[in-house]
Image (cartoon, rainbow, N blue to C red):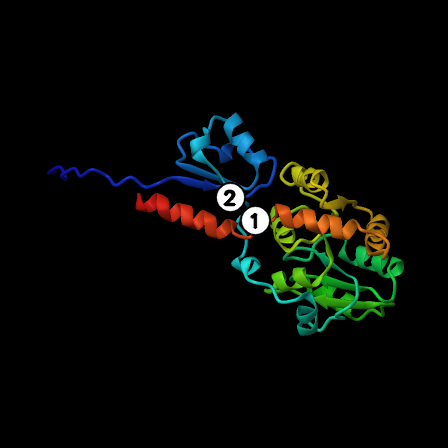
């Protein structure tokens, strides 16, 4: 069989986008990568520990949905648009796309601890059974129950703080919106470092106990407390709304070289 003529192969750039905020498995860091995009300097330090050099590393933040980079309407206007009380202190409880975790227990504890003038949003994801149970319950304050939503950026902007597990994507989104984060759980090893990231940067708290979670939110909503304002300002400083676009721009430049 006649040999095919040989042509010089075009070199395809090799890039990795690391989607963890803190602790990463070493397999993220291939020594022959052209560019390794990381979300934080903590991950950049790990990349160098595992053999990458500074010219291979680009710290751009965690890529999130472009909607979080759009100019935001005033909070009051968004709340009216979403059918919420426009003035009430508001906490949002998130259980991920599948509505997992102690959402019902936490919602009940919040309802017992917070004032009637406060407001709770519960995002149940695809957990219809939970959404139906919460919707049918009589609450002593305004509770808005939603299933899976495609406008999370609006709901995050509309609330004052969020309760969620320590997933890196939700944390990154909350930081962009300047929302303090009360973490209520994490996946061992994979998300454990995200807890210390939130605590060490002063942008939230951690508890797995529904009663303690409710106590923390009540303290945050105390009119004499400046905790929410302080944490919100710190969160905004950590947020990287341009991350997705910066990464795409740099990838495009790599291909064009």
Q: Is residue 181 visible?
A: no
Q: Which mark is residue 95?
A: none
**Which quarter of the rendering shows the N terminus?**
top left
Q: Residue at x 79, y 46 (%)?
A: 208
Q: In this view, does 141 lie to the left or right of 57?
A: right
Q: Which residue is drawn at 63% across and 57% down?
A: 97
Q: In this view, does 10 lie to the left or right of 33?
A: left
Of helix, strand and loop, which one carries label 1? loop
> Residue 27, relative to residue 155: is it above or below?
above
Q: Residue at x 85, y 57 (%)?
A: 223
The number of numbered discs placed on residues in the rendered structure image is 2
Quarter-wise, where is residue 89 in the image? bottom right
Question: In this orientation, which residue lies closer to the viewer: 158 or 188?
Answer: 158
Q: Which residue is drawn at 39% across and 31% down?
A: 32
**Of pointers 2 and 1, the one earlier in the residue sequence:** 2
Q: Residue furthest left?
A: 2
Question: In this orientation, which residue lies closer to the viewer: 237 or 219?
Answer: 237
- Number of other residues with Cα within 10 Å of mark 2, as a class: few under 14, some 14 to 19, many 20 or more: many
Of helix, strand and loop, which one carries label 2? loop
> Residue 129, relative to residue 13: is it above or below?
below
Across and down, in percent, residue 245 comes to 47, 52
Label pair 2/1, CB-CB below 8 angstroms: yes
Q: Is residue 40 visible?
A: yes
Across and down, in percent, residue 145 comes to 73, 67
**Label 1 sits on residue:** 240
- Number of other residues with Cα within 10 Å of mark 1, as a class: few under 14, some 14 to 19, many 20 or more: many
Cα separation, mark 2 vs mark 1, equals 8 Å
Across and down, in percent, residue 238 comes to 62, 45
**Which quarter of the rendering shows the C terminus?**
top left
Q: Which mark is residue 60?
A: 2
Across and down, in percent, residue 216 comes to 83, 50
């Amino acid at each position: 069989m006649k040999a095919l003529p040989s042509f010089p192969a075009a070199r395809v750039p090799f890039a990795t986008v690391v989607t963890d905020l803190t602790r990463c498995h070493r397999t993220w860091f291939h020594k022959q990568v052209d560019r390794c995009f990381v979300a934080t300097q903590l991950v950049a330090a790990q990349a160098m520990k595992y053999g990458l050099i500074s010219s291979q590393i680009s710290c751009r933040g965690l890529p999130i949905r472009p909607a979080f980079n759009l100019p935001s309407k005033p909070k009051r206007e968004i709340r009216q648009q979403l059918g919420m009380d426009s003035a009430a202190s508001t906490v949002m409880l998130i259980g991920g796309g599948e509505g997992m975790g102690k959402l019902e227990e936490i919602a009940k504890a919040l309802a017992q601890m917070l004032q009637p003038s406060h407001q709770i949003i519960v995002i149940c994801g695809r957990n219809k059974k939970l959404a139906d149970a919460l919707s049918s319950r009589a609450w002593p304050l305004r509770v808005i129950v939603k299933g899976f939503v495609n406008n999370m950026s609006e709901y995050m902007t509309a609330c004052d703080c969020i309760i969620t597990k320590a997933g890196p994507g939700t944390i990154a989104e909350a930081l962009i919106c300047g929302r303090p984060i009360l973490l209520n759980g994490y996946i061992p090893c994979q998300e454990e470092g995200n807890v210390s990231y939130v605590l060490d940067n002063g942008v939230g708290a951690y508890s797995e106990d529904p009663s303690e979670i409710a106590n923390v939110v009540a303290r945050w909503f105390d009119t004499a407390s400046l905790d929410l304002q302080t944490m919100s300002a710190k969160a905004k400083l950590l947020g990287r709304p341009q991350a997705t676009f910066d990464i795409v721009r740099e990838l495009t430049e790599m291909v064009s070289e």
